Image (cartoon, rainbow, N blue to C red):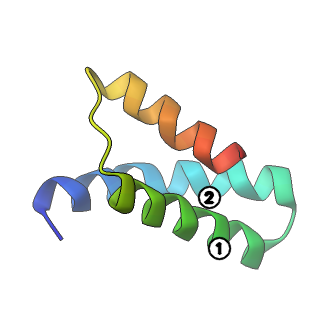
Amino acid sequence: MTHELENIITAEMDKLYRFAYNRLRDEYKAEDAVQDVFAKYITAAPTFPNEEQEKAWLIRVTLN
């Protein structure tokens, strides 16, 4: 895992978990959802012009 990827996961994990938990109301489902989001992030390896678009992508994938 690259240092950049570690930073993204560390910075966004709590926010995405809270977002998923608020939607799902289940601790384990929320954890699974966040894990799936980061698996998709790693697999897709998307590039973004700025940090805000990256955050929006992570939230959108979490929502879906």
Residue nearest the viewer, comparing 16 with 44: 44
Residue at (80% x, 51% y) in the render: 22
Q: Secondary structure at mark 2?
A: helix
Q: Residue furthest front?
A: 44
User: Horizontal and vertical percent for residue 18?
Assistant: 66, 53
Q: Secondary structure at mark 1?
A: helix
Residue at (36% x, 50% y) in the render: 11
- Disc 2 to disc 1, how far (Cα)? 9 Å
**Residue picked out by circle 2:** 17
User: Horizontal and vertical percent for residue 21?
Assistant: 76, 58
Reply above or below: 52 against 40. above
Residue at (47% x, 59% y) in the render: 40
> Pointer 1: residues within 10 angstroms few (<14), some, or many (20+)?
few
Residue at (65% x, 73% y) in the render: 32
User: Horizontal and vertical percent for residue 56?
Assistant: 51, 30
**Residue picked out by circle 1:** 32
Q: Residue furthest right?
A: 25
Mark positioned earlier in the residue sequence (2 or 1) = 2
Q: Amino acid at mark 1?
A: Asp
